[in-house]
Image (cartoon, grey):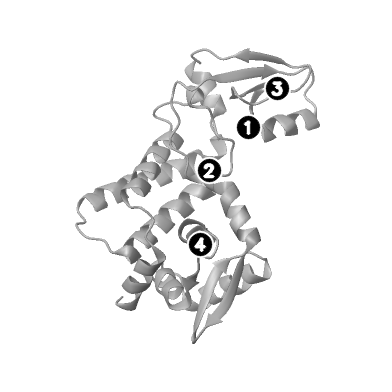
Amino acid sequence: MISLFGDLAQGHGDAIDGPVLSTIMAALGVRPEASRVALHRLRNDGWLQSRKVGRISQHSLTAQGRAESAAASPRIYAAPPDLSEPWQMVLTEENGRETDKNLRAGGFVSVTPRVYIGPMGSTAPKGSLALQGEAPPDWLRRAAEPVALEAEYDALLSALMAVEQQMARTSQMNALDIAVLRCLIVHNWRRLVLKHPALPGGLMRRDWAGYQCHLRVDGLLRRYPRPALQDLAAASAVA
């Protein structure tokens, strides 16, 4: 549901009518009771708010929900990186927990103790040695990849390739169909890409599943732009 609101109704004043939300969640295979529980929980957690407009409930992100969604959006919707994008290697004097925490917060990845690689624009800690990266060997590219997510990226890539094949055979999609498709893509992409630092393009293997997923996510979201909320309401009314 957070993926849905973050994609369709992130702007100030954007709201999704209750019947529209119910139709979308049903199309996603979510049971009505599960949707009600999710709404209740997200309201209690300060993510969503609801109000009555006549006989219809309207649901929207709170200021906190919009802020959280906006913070994640640049990563979720970023264009695939240029594979020649510059990177740097940082060598630290010690392998302290605080140093490691600060480097990871800056987008660096540890490849061996005291050796980190990351974006060229990130600031290296005081006292460390920063070296501009050249064309990295394949083993270093692999060391930068989030190994723990390898199987999940492989599964997502297979799913996205299947979606591409299905979409090539699909002639017409209304606003509701597109909203459901986008929600599935965004949700499954965000749950992986937000779990690890953004790797500079210069450190990526072209055939890495994470990069190939990024290419397909970007292509599908561009091919099927975000539908207007009024178009969703119209499509939901005849669904």
Which residue is the site of mark 3?
124
Which three-letter amino acid code belongs to the residue tagged 2? Pro
Q: Reading the chain from its start, which is encountered first: label 3 or label 1?
A: 1
Q: Nearer the viewer, residue 229 or 80?
A: 229
Which residue is the site of mark 2?
74
Distance between mark 4 and mark 2 Cα atoms? 16 Å
Of the residues tagged 4 and 1, which is closer to the observer?
4
> In which quadrant is the C terminus drawn?
bottom left
Residue found at the far front of this picture:
13
State yes or no: discs 1 and 2 in contact (Cβ < 8 Å): no
State yes or no: discs 2 and 3 in contact (Cβ < 8 Å): no
Which residue is the site of mark 4?
5
Image location of residue 90, percent across then percent down: 67, 18
Distance between mark 3 and mark 1 Cα atoms? 11 Å
Q: Reading the chain from its start, which is encountered first: label 2 or label 3?
A: 2
Which three-letter amino acid code belongs to the residue tagged 3? Ala
Which label sits on residue 117?
Answer: none
Q: Residue drawn at (22%, 60%), measured in percent from left and top?
A: 172
Which residue is the site of mark 1?
107
| Few, some or many residues within 10 Å of mark 1 (<14, 14–19, 20+) | some
